[in-house]
Image (tube, rainbow, N blue to C red):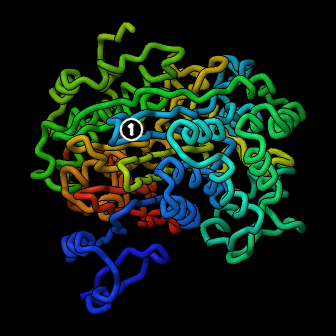
Amino acid sequence: MRIRLSTPINRLTTLTCASILAVTTSTAVLAQQAILEGERFHPEVSEKGMVATSHFLASKVARDVLAQGGNAVDAAVTAGFALAVTQPRSGNIGGGGFMLVSDEKSGEVVAIDYREKAPSAAFETMFQNDEGEAVSELSRYTHNASGVPGTVAGLAMALEKYGTLSLADALAPAIRLAEDGFALPQRFVDGIRDTRDRLEPWPGSRKKFFKEDGSLYQVGDIFKQPDLAATLTRIAEQGSREFYEGKTAELITAQMEKNGGLMTMEDLANYEPAIREPSHGTYRGHDVYAMSPPSSGGVHIVQMLNILEEYDIAEMGFNSANTIHVMAEAMKRAYADRSEYLGDTDFVEVPLEGLTSKEYAKELRQQISMDKATPSSEIAPGNPLPYESNETTHFSIADGNGMAVSNTYTINFSYGSGIVVEGAGFLLNNEMDDFSAKPGVPNAYGLLGGEANKVEPNKRMLSSMTPTIVKKDGKNFLVTGSPGGSRIITTTLQVLMNVIDHDMNIQTAVSVPRIHHQWLPDEIRIEQGISPDTIELLESLGHTVSRQEAMGAAQSLMIEDSIFTGGADPRRSTSSAMGL
Ligand code: GLY
């Protein structure tokens, strides 16, 4: 018998039963491993804490922080900065995101919103031509594609409120990786080659991503980032406000002025993250916490779970035609509502209680037939009244003292706008494309947005990011989330259902094939691995089924009986879960 054993050094270490006896491993871990015997996918296992990120170097530095006595927030902030160095396609300091922190001791789950904001000179028609048509080039590949970045302020706030490390200590591994460099993996090299056309026009991007003679780096080359190292060092020495008011802010605005960008020193100085209450729902006795607006993720994951809860999903079976049918029907209805109601709650009223109520879910469920797909053309945004008065990357981290962090952050597209700030060494986001350039015209993910998400000065653009923490009996149970644009919410939904409905271990839950429906276009998008018979059955119900490339990268973890299990999503070759 061969058992995969968690070690701090190499997660792929496998040992025979005999050699395990010679290793100091607790009975609890061995018991858990015994339970996992016979399964095809094996999670990382640990008793003391777990880190799951999309890059092994970020996982390693975060795990080191836990090993040295840091808490989950310390490790998360360290991972966030390290990913900005090792995975510049989505790890960032030029973008924004959302972090959920759950502290079992206080019972509190808080959401830190560090989403980018539109500059103060932004205006509703800024991405339209003279004929009033939306021009996606403007909202994606220009200096005005960038919202005011929130990552540095957001990570610093998390550390200050919930961490124990200094900002300088949390930045130290990232600075070291940027200064000393690291050997490039295949994925990095392929990413730059595939994005060459977008990066090459900009002097800062040429300097950062290509050799001096303009040629491409190769696998195994040591990649150093001196400008980024200098920026991170300034932040470490002067604090997070340096990014917003110091030399880094000057470099950003100099670049804006040179290229017709609207972002000013004042916009940067005025940027502040916000603490928000997460969206909350229940699913089969579990408490589900996920990101509230300006992300649509939490609202719609709760809405879909509410619709699905009354079906016997376990009995219907994993990825059976019936299960996929009801999931797709729930997804369509949620995404239709997203197009109408969701936006930045600092600017527009969003009927949050209505959308996440069990009563509204019942109303939507009654529209679903088991015999026939409802064409999207027959689904309009519902009426969830009353209004109350009133390429992204994800990582999951938990420590041994009851604290868990779920963090998703992004610069929107892979490599964002493609524009590296000259002299500062980091990419600017193209998050302004997440606004509705013109209500009713789809964004890059085919998502429709309404008036609620139109461009306004200082407003946060609507997101789909869904960092999620599920609690069971008051204890952290599942920490998950994903990149993937419009597919983020449905990817996260399926990890959660795979664990709760289908009783999968976390590695299986993140590995198995996924599906997606977003109302428009009216098709179920499926990954490889859904059987032809199932597709035929779905088509006989009236669904259009479209086989597409892999969706999401749900770096996730679970905690059961004080045992931590980590699942690294195989859809990314650099994904890594590391136990303590
Ligand atoms: N930029 C993708 C999202 O925030 O949903």
Asked whether mark 1 lies closer than 8 Å to ligand 1, one says: no
Q: Is residue 74 left or right of residue 379?
A: right
State whether residue 246 is above or below residue 208. above
Residue drawn at (44%, 58%), measured in percent from left and top?
Answer: 550
Residue at the far bottom in the pictured view: 18
What amino acid is found at the position of numbered circle 1 in the picture? Gln
Q: Quadrant of residue 561?
A: bottom left
Q: Which of the pair 326/460 is nearer the observer?
A: 460
Residue drawn at (36%, 34%), measured in percent from left and top?
Answer: 108
Quadrant of the rendering where the N terminus is positioned: bottom left
Q: Which of the pair 489/79 is nearer the observer?
A: 79
Q: Is residue 274 left or right of residue 178?
A: left
Q: Quadrant of residue 192?
A: bottom right
Question: Residue 101 location, x and y as percent?
Answer: 43, 40
Near mark 1 (Cα within 10 A), the count class, few <14, some 14-19 or many ≥20, is many
Q: Is residue 112 left or right of residue 505?
A: right
Q: Is residue 257 left or right of residue 409?
A: right
Question: Residue 189 location, x and y as percent?
Answer: 67, 68
For residue 284, say whether it is visible. Answer: yes
For residue 39, say whether it is visible. Answer: no
Residue drawn at (75%, 38%), measured in percent from left and top?
Answer: 243
Residue drawn at (67%, 38%), measured in percent from left and top?
Answer: 140
Q: Which of the pair 424/453 is nearer the observer?
A: 424
Quadrant of the rendering where the C terminus is positioned: bottom left
Question: Residue 525 location, x and y as percent?
Answer: 37, 49
Question: Residue 437 location, x and y as percent?
Answer: 61, 25
Q: Which residue is mark 1?
A: 518
Number of numbered discs: 1
State whether residue 3 is above or below residue 109. below
Helix, strand or loop status at disc 1? loop
